[in-house]
Amino acid sequence: MTSRRDFLKTATAGSAGLALAFSLPMGSRLARATTAITFEPNAFLRIGIDEMITVVVKHSEMGQGVFTSLPMIVAEELDASWSKIKFEMAPAGAAYNHSTFGAQITGGSTSISTAYEQMRNAGATARAMLVTAAASKWGVSTETCRTSEGFVFHDASAKKASYGSLAGAAGSLAVPEKVTLKDPANFKIIGKETPRLDSRAKTDGSAQFGLDVHLPGMLTAVVARPPVFGGSVKSLDSSKAEAFKGVHKVVRIKTGVAVVATDFWTAKTARDLLEIIWDDSNVEKTDSVALAKSYAELADKAGAVAKSVGDAEAVLKGTASQVEATYVFPFLAHAAMEPLNCVAQVKDGGCELWLGTQFQTGDMMAAAGILGITPDKVKINTTMLGGGFGRRANKDADFSAEAVMVAAAMTPTPVRTVWTREDDMRGGYYRPMYVHKVTAGVDAAGNPSAWHQRIVGQSIMSGTAFEAFMVKDGVDVTSVEGASDMPYTLPNLQVEYHLTNPNVPSLWWRSVGHTHTAFVAETMLDELCHLGGKDPLDQRLALLAEHPRHLAVLKLVAEKAKWHQPLAKKRGVRRGRGLAVHESFGSVVAQVAEVSLSNDGKVKVDRVVCAVHCGRLINPLTVEAQMQGAIVFGLSAALHGQINMKDGRVVESNFTDYPVLRMSQMPVVEVHLVASTDAPTGVGEPGTPPIAPAVCNAIFQATGKRVRTLPIDTSSLKA
């Protein structure tokens, strides 16, 4: 059977159709940002004689809609009929590398922003070749032909030909080096509300996620891992597990002990019979309470300077009207709905993986390193992802690497290695804990005069391939993003950072550093507004006068939320309205939250009004859905999310003690989009940062009490 990779190596002619592999130049903006990275061929298009058009998508689908939005861009420039468009997930390989990261990866809300011009060029190039093929067939000039809905027309002779009928002839032509793109004013598909192409498969159950993969003779493995990070096996008695019916083998691997059995429940039950004594004598046993205390102590000391404007310390010494606050943010789990899993098969000197991954290159390199083979001997089959949030773009390729280790011991039998929810919750990777200390003041006119901020926390980039250009002079840029680049006009600003290294695996988490910096920026600014006697909206508008995108979302959200109209009162509850605005991943999102609090302090978020500026809209339905999902994600963290460490072990285990938002807790969410002709920017993550500060600013309006530690402690909000 011919693989997709083999198929795409050649452009077939004749009855097979037209296959195009484009090596597209990187835009100057990306080139400036990544001068050391070579732009590889990364967009593929296949047109069959059956008139069906297949867009091969290089980015993983985890709910963000790339299986629809990227084909929309191609179809637009191709002048294709949307009814003829199909998608196909790309195989793993350098041809599909991310133009910025130099690896095949999905993250950073960059799928559209980095592929927009590439996919436009892909569609336009194919259209140009089809027109050339038709013009040659009819003996006319290409200038006299036009395209529409999957056909090439020559109006003067009343001739037309479908793309499928021209595919063979077009496939024999040389690929033009440069093509003309459409005037966006003529877009017919981009910007239109378009139902997702993968909705039916996800609805009827035919969509394939990692746990849906079933291979002949496949076994299932579950791994016992050290309860303290960095621990190891001191002694093992596996006799009871090995004697359990259905168990095929107990395997010692680098990360622990794997039980391989006929099915998951057998493997899991047998794993519980393992008698393991763990050695954690020489590893740090992290404690959340002690760690927060040590972070707070560090926050009192000068750190590495991330941003310095004016002289914040000197101004604050002479400012009577000021606020000093300490903020504490816990470790957070990704808690994706689909548990981690990977099917691996090692045979014939190679390895094949089936998994939902955000980081194909990392998985490929890890497998090759474990087996001592070259990366081209590793084949990755990417399924759909039941949630990612960064967890499935693991810098250590942890869950795929384990699967390869287990499969290597079972050659040539395919083995699915599955993590239980508890396995991931207690032995996974986390958004780091952070502590911020901020002192800020206002001048005689009530305007912010100085802001001094210290951030203490773990670097998610240290020890990774990104460290060389993401950690400079002791500052991890992902830990200070949203603080060191605050858009507010502040005459005196000092941001410092203390890089820590506790024994807890860390990883990027939806919206990365903005998860904590946005909260501090937007709640402290709210405090300064109150201190200076300013309306929170009016003050933001004044401080953002030179930032038109921020102004646009603020004005839109204020209008839709009726900011200047008092909230309707409800008997027996305290009500408040709060505002936050934040830029991340190139997009600006403003949110107004309306909350109600009972006398015992319970918080109910009633309504969230959201306005987003993300440049040119590809599919408005996707943008709306992503804002809604990001708000749910952020609310779950604000109201409930925390991972606690005690004696080196994670306390939480599952959704029972690490809850996510229930349907009954879901507020009404209204999403409003700013129309723009700017280049498209990210939407997967930017909706998360503003929601917690908007809610907590609303809590202050309702109660007069400030929230500075997440998740929200409702006991402190009692009437």
Image: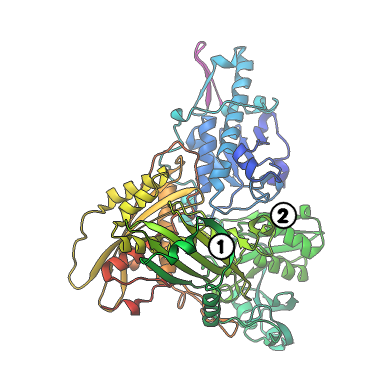
User: Is label 1 in a helix, a strand or a loop?
Assistant: helix
Q: Quadrant of residue 248?
A: bottom right
Reading the image, the residue beneath label 1 is 479
Q: Magenta stretch containing residue 253, yes or no?
A: no
**Number of residues whose C-alpha sits closer than 10 Å to that of mark 2, classed few (under 14), some (14–19) or many (20 or more):** many
Q: Front-most of 343 and 702?
A: 702
Residue 215 in the image: state x and y as whole percent.
66, 62
Kindly identify the amino acid type of the residue bearing the numbered disc 1.
Ser
Image-based side of 552 in relation to 3, left or right: left
**Image position of 334 with respect to 385: above or below:** below
Stretch of the chain drawn in magenta: 151-162
For residue 379, which numbered disc appears in the image? 2
Residue 298 in the image: state x and y as whole percent.
56, 74
**Number of residues whose C-alpha sits closer than 10 Å to that of mark 1, classed few (under 14), some (14–19) or many (20 or more):** many
Magenta stretch mostly in which secondary structure?
Answer: strand
Let me know if residue 562 appears in the view. yes
User: Is label 2 in a helix, a strand or a loop?
Assistant: strand
Image quarter hosting the C terminus = bottom left
> What separation in Å lies between label 2 and label 1 (alpha carbons)?
35 Å
